[in-house]
């Protein structure tokens, strides 16, 4: 965008050109009057006609110059903008406009074009995300639906004995539970992204909430014979407990899922002005490449292909932490384990 000083200079130059033009027309008219009076002494009609002709001619010349100026400086840009916005409205988000001036010397038209370019880029990014999202959801739905179809067909078969039938029925139950979890997570993420869920901040004893979250996973912890170490300071914060529960349940369930039987999970809560929660495990760890994507929707690292899940957990966690005003980071070494660190800025009381 042009600076305020150059804008004022531009406007002053415009006025100057206007006054000079008027002055030139008046001067030429006076000169014509003086020489015409000498030539056509007393013939007022002739003098008047000559002066009128001169003024009209000069005014016409100025109008032509102004029309050409407008065509070059205004209409060309307006037409470019009209064409571009027309294409965007028609769904073509690849449109990009070339500004007339380099960055830093932008005039108003350049600014509008630059904004249109940014708008089109954002729209095409959203479009890619939308189509990716739809294809990811369809992909994630396909596998459980195929399992449900095959197993329910098998259950109907007369040749299947009671034991096998019971086994198939339990596969059906767990698969439909996974399907429900997937749909619930998609809906939650969607509501969070559209900011449909309002936060309700209140005072919470964070240590108590974390203890309850760990207890909820007691069965799975026992099943995998994991050692769990909790070290919680008594901390009360002002935050939304339902939102926070999404964070703790995903971090704890990941730690359980990605740690081999017999491993160890350590969860701590400390305060250094902000509340700091660490969820550490001695599991498979996260490679550098995987670490760059773990907060993306539907992303699952190589190590998790054999595991349950859809890669939505950490995307939800990140969204929630952004909404609550906090930070999440991860430290990990492949084969040794991972530590997720959550920092909540919400007032520690
Ligand atoms: N504690 C952990 N140890 C090792 N890898 C992890 C850990 N937590 C997350 N990851 C990696 O990050 C990926 C994304 O995690 P996320 O929780 O989003 O998905 P998920 O657990 O695979 O599926 P879902 O959460 O939908 O059940 C995982 O697939 C895994 O590769
Ligand atoms: Mg998960």
Image (tube, helix red, strand yellow):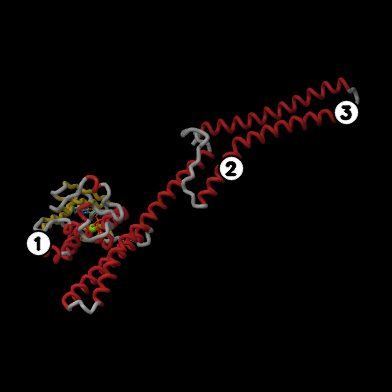
Quarter holding the C terminus is bottom left
Residue wearing tag 3: 46
**Residue 51 image point, x, y percent:** 81, 28
Q: CA distance from mark 2 to mark 1?
A: 71 Å
Q: CA distance from mark 3 to mark 2?
A: 46 Å
Q: Residues within 10 Å of mark 2 (few under 14, many from 20)?
A: few
Residue 132 visible somewhere in the drawing: yes
Horizontally, residue 29 falls left or right of residue 38, namely: left
Residue nearest the observer in this picture, 346 or 279: 279
- Identify the secondary structure beneath mark 2: helix
Horizontally, residue 126 falls left or right of residue 339, namely: right
Residue 203 visible somewhere in the drawing: no
**Residue 104 image point, x, y percent:** 46, 33
Splitting the image into 4 quarters, where does residue 55 fall? top right
Q: Are marks 2 and 1 in contact (CB under 8 Å)?
A: no
Q: Residue furthest right?
A: 42
The quarter of the picture showing ligand 2: bottom left
Q: CA distance from mark 1 to mark 3?
A: 115 Å
Per the rendering, the mark at residue 79 is: 2
Can you tell which of label 3 and label 2 is closer to the viewer?
2
Residue nearest the observer in this picture, 276 or 297: 297
Per the rendering, the mark at residue 225 is: 1
Identity of the residue drawn at 37% across and 58% down: 134
Going from N to C along the chain, the mark reached first, 2 or 1, is 2
């Amino acid at each position: 965008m042009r600076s305020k000083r150059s804008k004022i200079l531009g406007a002053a130059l415009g006025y100057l050109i206007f006054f000079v033009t008027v002055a030139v027309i008046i001067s030429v008219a006076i000169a014509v009057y003086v020489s015409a009076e000498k030539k056509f002494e007393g013939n007022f009609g002739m003098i008047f006609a000559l002066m009128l002709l001169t003024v009209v001619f000069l005014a016409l010349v100025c109008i032509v110059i102004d029309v050409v100026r407008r065509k070059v400086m205004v209409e060309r840009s307006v037409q470019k903008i009209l064409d571009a916005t027309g294409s965007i409205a028609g769904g073509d988000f690849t449109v990009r406009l070339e500004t007339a001036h380099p960055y830093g010397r932008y005039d108003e038209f350049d600014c509008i074009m630059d904004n249109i370019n940014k708008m089109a880029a954002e729209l095409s990014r959203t479009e890619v995300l939308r189509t990716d999202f739809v294809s990811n959801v369809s992909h994630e739905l396909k596998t459980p639906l195929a399992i449900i179809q095959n197993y329910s067909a098998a259950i109907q078969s007369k040749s299947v004995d009671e034991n096998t039938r019971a086994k198939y029925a339990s596969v059906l139950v767990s698969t439909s539970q996974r399907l429900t979890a997937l749909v619930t997570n998609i809906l939650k993420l969607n509501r969070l992204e559209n900011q449909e869920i309002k936060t309700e901040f209140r005072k919470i004893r964070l240590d108590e909430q974390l203890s309850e979250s760990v207890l909820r996973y007691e069965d799975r912890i026992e099943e995998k014979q994991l050692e769990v170490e909790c070290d919680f300071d008594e901390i009360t914060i002002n935050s939304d407990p339902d939102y926070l529960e999404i964070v703790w349940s995903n971090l704890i369930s990941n730690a359980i899922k990605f740690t081999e039987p017999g491993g160890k999970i350590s969860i701590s809560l400390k305060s250094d002005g902000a509340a700091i929660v660490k969820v550490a495990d001695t599991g498979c760890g996260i490679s550098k490449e995987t670490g760059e994507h773990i907060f993306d929707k539907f992303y699952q690292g190589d190590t998790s292909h054999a595991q349950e899940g859809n890669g939505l957990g950490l995307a939800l966690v990140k969204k929630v932490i952004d909404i609550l005003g906090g930070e999440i980071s991860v430290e990990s070494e492949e084969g040794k384990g991972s530590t997720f660190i959550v920092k909540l800025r919400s007032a520690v009381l």
